[in-house]
């Protein structure tokens, strides 16, 4: 219903958006991904790889070099969804298997998975207090956690959500903090959570319907690497918004038009990428962090090709942007040269 609503409203606004910012110049390369859909990115600067997963219904993670050339597939990762790189290991939320998969980032080989007991549908991952935090998305959403070696599973941190799936973000700049926001219900609540090494969570702060115009379901979420702000891409309003990590109040916005679905921040925190579900307009934007004027925009040039939720990421040096789109049958990895 959410996708249908987006499409119907897009038809109504298409005539007014056709004259918006022009599409980016031809400085993109593409690679066909061997699955349809999108689950998550992990960028590995040490070994020069980008990992891409396909989400529910897919069982592999595809690996590319930083220029977008295919390297290999890592298979037998049922429902590979969110990806998180920590200490040379890519952790994989196996949504269709109720487990956490692992990939050795150096050798690109699959490591033994971690079971989650009776928990099902792990979707989002974060790292804090020497634990992997896992948001499950089946029935009542639960945030669980496990140590990096697979021991110490805590199935319920004491923080659960009826009928809701929580998008998670963390950064090493705030090693005991996890940010959470509802990914499938709106208006959402944005939480700043204290993560304990025993696997429990407590609410430091929360705000319902955050931002200057509120926030529907959080399609995309990112955090500055210095931990100062959290970025939200909500279905509404029609901009990506940075929220202060200290007070969860609005800090700045970047205008995109309907309907924001993705956000990313470069490693040096000087650029922000925004992605939208826009059949008739630009799909991808890049802004200087301090400006509302984009330096790069791109239109997939097809009303059937949609940017996937949360599917934008920067290269380690910030000179390249990656995005994943799908036409409903095939997914494509787009590699944008931001220096051309």
Image (tube, rainbow, N blue to C red):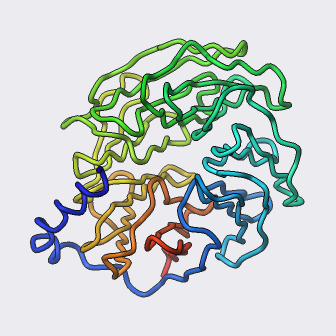
Classify 87 as above or below 281. above
Classify 27 as above or below 333. below
- The answer to whether residue 119 is left or right of residue 261 is right
Q: State the image coordinates of residue 170 (x, y, percent, origin top left).
A: 57, 34
Q: State the image coordinates of residue 4 (x, y, percent, origin top left).
A: 26, 57
Q: How many numbered tags mark residues here? A: 0
The reply to whether residue 168 is visible in this rendering is: yes
Toward which corner of the image does residue 335 lie, by quadrant? bottom right
Decide which of 145, 299 is in the foreground and name it: 145
Residue drawn 70% across the image and 22% down it: 129
Q: State the image coordinates of residue 95 (x, y, percent, origin top left).
A: 63, 44
Residue drawn 72% across the image and 12% down it: 198
- The answer to whether residue 254 is left or right of residue 126 is left
- The answer to whether residue 287 is left or right of residue 60 is left
Classify 135 as above or below 60. above
- The answer to whether residue 120 is left or right of residue 286 is right
Decide which of 48, 82 is in the foreground and name it: 82
The reply to whether residue 40 is visible in this rendering is: no
Q: State the image coordinates of residue 268 (x, y, percent, origin top left).
A: 55, 51
Decide which of 297, 217 is in the foreground and name it: 217
Decide which of 100, 231 is in the foreground and name it: 100
Residue drawn 47% across the image and 34% down it: 165
């Amino acid at each position: 219903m959410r996708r249908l609503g987006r499409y119907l409203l897009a038809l109504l606004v298409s005539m007014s958006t056709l004259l918006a910012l022009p599409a980016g110049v031809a400085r993109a390369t593409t690679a066909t991904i061997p699955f349809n859909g999108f689950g998550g990115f992990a960028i590995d600067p040490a070994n020069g790889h980008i990992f891409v997963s396909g989400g529910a219904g897919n069982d592999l993670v595809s690996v590319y070099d930083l220029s977008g050339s295919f390297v290999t597939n890592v298979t037998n990762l049922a429902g590979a969804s969110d990806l998180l790189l920590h200490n040379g290991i890519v952790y994989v939320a196996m949504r269709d298997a109720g487990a956490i998969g692992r990939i050795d980032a150096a050798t690109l080989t699959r490591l033994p998975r971690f079971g989650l007991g009776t928990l099902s549908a792990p979707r989002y991952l974060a790292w804090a207090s020497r634990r992997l935090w896992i948001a499950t998305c089946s029935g009542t959403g639960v945030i669980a956690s496990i140590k990096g070696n697979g021991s110490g599973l805590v199935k319920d941190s004491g923080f659960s959500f009826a009928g809701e799936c929580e998008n998670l973000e963390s950064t090493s700049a705030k090693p005991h903090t996890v940010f959470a926001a509802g990914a499938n219900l709106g208006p959402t609540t944005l939480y700043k959570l204290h993560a304990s090494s025993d696997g429990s969570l407590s609410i430091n702060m929360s705000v319902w319907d955050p931002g200057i115009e509120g926030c529907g379901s959080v399609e995309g979420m990112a955090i500055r690497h210095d931990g100062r702000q959290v970025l939200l891409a909500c279905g509404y309003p029609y901009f990506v918004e940075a929220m202060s990590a200290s007070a969860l109040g609005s800090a700045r916005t970047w205008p995109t038009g309907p309907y924001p679905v993705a956000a990313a921040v470069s490693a040096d925190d000087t650029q922000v990428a925004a992605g939208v579900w826009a059949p008739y307009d630009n799909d991808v934007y890049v802004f200087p962090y301090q400006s509302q004027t984009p330096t790069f925009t791109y239109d997939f040039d097809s009303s059937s090709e949609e940017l996937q939720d949360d599917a934008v990421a920067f290269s380690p040096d910030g000179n390249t942007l990656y995005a994943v789109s799908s036409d409903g049958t095939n997914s494509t990895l787009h590699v944008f040269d931001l220096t051309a």
